[in-house]
Amino acid sequence: MRQSARLERKNFIVDGRKVSRLRKILGAPSESEAVRVAVDRALNAEEAIGALERLRKRGTWGSNLAY
């Protein structure tokens, strides 16, 4: 996680078993860190999807590629 991130306490209702599984899968030292990593990854994925969608709409990537 970035050192400059401003952390805030938030309360969520989540499936505790899923958070525990997530922590183990990510090898995170805590459930809080696992959730922070998962949020960062989800944001990164959405940004990548948006970039790919913009490329597709511009016609520089996607269905018009021929090999």
Image (spheres, grey):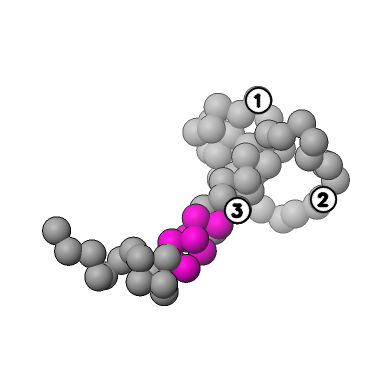
Which label was assigned to residue 59?
none
Q: CA distance from mark 1 to mark 2?
A: 19 Å
Q: Is residue 45 left or right of residue 12?
A: left
For badge 3, the amino acid type reads: Leu
Q: CA distance from mark 1 to mark 3?
A: 21 Å
**Magenta stretch bounds:** 47-54
Q: Return the residue at label 2.
A: 10
Tell which of 38 and 61 is nearer to you. 61
- Number of numbered discs on residues: 3
Q: Return the residue at label 3.
A: 43
Q: Is residue 17 above or below residue 50?
A: above
Q: Residue, x 55% and y 57% (percent of image)?
A: 47
Residue 62 position within the rendered picture, expressed as x and y whole percent measured from the top left:
30, 66
Q: Residue, x 17% and y 64% (percent of image)?
A: 66
Tell which of 38 and 65 is nearer to you. 65
Quadrant holding the C terminus: bottom left
Q: What is the crowding at mark 3: few (fewer than 14 residues within 10 Å), some, or many (at least 20)? A: few
Q: CA distance from mark 2 to mark 3?
A: 18 Å
Residue 9 position within the rendered picture, expressed as x and y whole percent measured from the top left:
85, 46
Residue 48 visible somewhere in the drawing: yes
For badge 1, the amino acid type reads: Pro
Tell which of 43 and 31 is nearer to you. 43
Q: Return the residue at label 1.
A: 29
Residue 11 position within the rendered picture, expressed as x and y whole percent measured from the top left:
80, 52
Residue furthest bottom as drawn: 57
Q: Is residue 46 left or right of residue 64?
A: right
Q: Residue, x 66% and y 53% (percent of image)?
A: 14
